[in-house]
Image: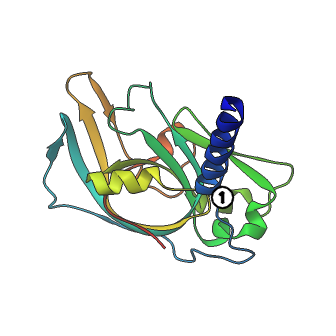
Amino acid sequence: MIKHFLFIVLLIGGVYYYWTTRPVEHGPGVVAPETPVQEVTYNADKFTYEGFKITPKANIDLEARVLSIKNYYFDKYSELVPTDIVVGWGPMSDERNLSSLMVRQSDRSFYFEMAKPPIKKNAMWQHASNMHLVGSTKKIRDKINSLREGHVIRIEGYLVNATSPKKGWTLKSSLRRDDIGKDSSELVWIKSLTIL
């Protein structure tokens, strides 16, 4: 009797987990057509958040498709930035291009695994980005935790640099669209996050 009950509980838990974490599918076509809007900010004040010094470098407004999500628990940045996402826009938001590749995240960066690029490689990199997310409120942090691959999202906020005086590290945001590699990620202070 107890075994049957445990089996049913585990089955329900498994179905719930799958249902709430499964990728969102849209079918063929671009679902996030616009290039992110980024403007250097000259008048935003530095501020402190939970002991970290935050320096805004640019305003960011983007609509993009979530291509991959990775949570970090034990690296030196995880206290400030527990979640990274890879997002794509334009051709990298189109399932016809995404179906033939895998997006992998590791060591706060990302890469593509594929037999053959669906579009030119430089176009792939110019239409995708790894973002370290910092939610400005608990509501936004909860929404970050609810994101799934395939969600189309809108983010408004700042690209920032962050310093930990206590631990002695600085994490800088990329401000370019054409860079690749470990230092090419954006560090995003999110003022608004909408799942579209």
Give 28 or 163, whichever is nearer the viewer: 28
| Residue 17 image offset from top left, x and y in percent | 61, 48
Identify the residue at horizontal 35%, vertical 41% (top origin): 172
Identify the residue at horizontal 26%, vertical 22% (top origin): 168
In the rendered image, the residue lying farthest to the top is 167
| Residue 142 image offset from top left, x and y in percent | 37, 52
Left or right: 28, with 104 as reference point: right
Which amino acid lies under the numbered mark 1 shown in the image of this protein?
Answer: Pro
Identify the residue at horizontal 45%, vertical 43% (top origin): 83
Task: Specify the color scheme.
Answer: rainbow
Left or right: 67, with 71 as reference point: right
Identify the residue at horizontal 66%, vertical 44% (top origin): 14
Q: Residues within 10 Å of mark 1 (few under 14, many from 20)?
A: some
Left or right: 63, with 44 as reference point: right
Residue 19, located in which quarter of the rendered image?
bottom right
Which residue position is annotated with label 1? 23
Q: Taking 70 as reference, is 136 above or below it?
A: below
